[in-house]
Image (cartoon, coloured by chain):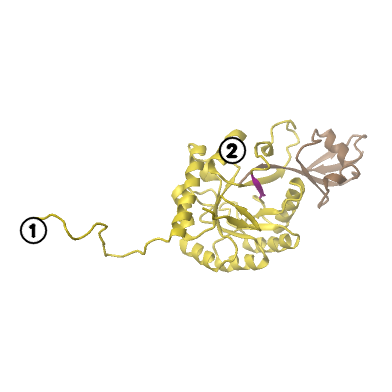
Chain colours: A yellow, B brown
Amino acid sequence: MQDPLIIAGKSYQSRLLVGTGKYRDFQQTADALDASGCEIVTVAIRRVNLGQNPNEPNLLDFLPKNRYTLLPNTAGCYTADDAVRTLRLARELLDDHRLVKLEVLGDPHTLYPNVRDTLKAAETLVKEGFDVMVYTSDDPIVAKELEQIGCCAIMPLASLIGSGMGILNPWNLQLIIEQSNVPVLVDAGVGTASDATIGMELGCHGVLMNTAIAAAQDPVRMALAMKLGVQAGREAYLAGRMPKRFYSATPSSPREGVISSRSG
Amino acid sequence: MPCIRINGEDRTLSGHVDSLAALIAELGLTGKRIAIERNGEIVPRSQHANTPLTEGDALEIVVAVGGG
């Protein structure tokens, strides 16, 4: 069944995007990505460790270029300026790569986004030709502004980054989904497969996660669970769920022909 | 000998390091997947060899690492 996710003009079969942080080692990262079936993987950009042996393995060696679309992020940036500089470096590092994840944080305790600087950075990046997938709060007004600036995907949080608290405000997510003309992906907060399913059932176009997989007891197995959870949620959304009937049961089996000593 | 700043740390360059490419070689990073910003501007890979280093330059040298 063809149901591609289209981001910045490119089609993807998988609606699960996975981060590459916090795994035990690069091999486990590669195994989890493989099990998840994802096609887009996020990477962070950091200063090279000058004291370190330069021949140590590099993450990029474990991510086959023809299999994954890399999504460099601006994790850890607290100003629009730092985020823009980071993604310019990413573009150079990844050979004129344009698809990026913008996040500008506002507070080290909650990692809640600074939407003012996010908007500012988004404007600059879009002008410079980047395809910007943007992490933001679940404020529909901000989401609309980011879309109007030209971001190619809106990625509201479901709950705080790395918290695993799941989808705390489905109503706001739904408002954003209904008003948006670009893909909306839940980014941050998913803790287990049912969270991903709920997000997809709401009508999200995809889910981005990292800690929910990396911090599971068995990350490779959880990666598979997430793949199935996202698929289940997407199929349920497309199928269209039955209406809820409050305080009114309807039997699934025929009412007639039941053997009974009470009937005549 | 010029003193420059690399990734936030001051360093004095030895005499033979007269270009960005020479510095990359000195750091053992030749051929590695890195990107470099000099004084706030990206230096494309093709320009490493003919980018001189001068007193007070500030470099950022980055790699891709795991992240979400």
Residue A250 belongs to magenta span: no
Nearest the eye: A79 or B65: B65
Q: Are marks 2 and 1 in contact (CB under 8 Å)?
A: no
- Magenta stretch: give its range: A68-72
In the image, residue A113 above or below residue A41: below
Q: Check disc 1 and give the amino acid type.
A: Arg
Image location (x, y in percent) of residue B64: 70, 43
Image location (x, y in percent) of residue A61: 68, 36
Residue A69 belongs to magenta span: yes
User: Mark 2 and mark 1: span between their CA atoms?
Assistant: 64 Å
Residue linked to disc 2: A29
Q: Is residue A23 left or right of residue B40?
A: left
Q: Earlier in the sequence, mark 2 or mark 1?
A: 2
Please report the residue visible at 35 percent of the width from the left and 63 percent of the height from the top.
Answer: A244
Question: Is the residue at mark 2 from the same chain as the one at mark 1?
Answer: yes
Please report the residue visible at 62 percent of the width from the left and 35 percent of the height from the top.
Answer: A26
Residue linked to disc 1: A262
Nearest the eye: A133 or A142: A133
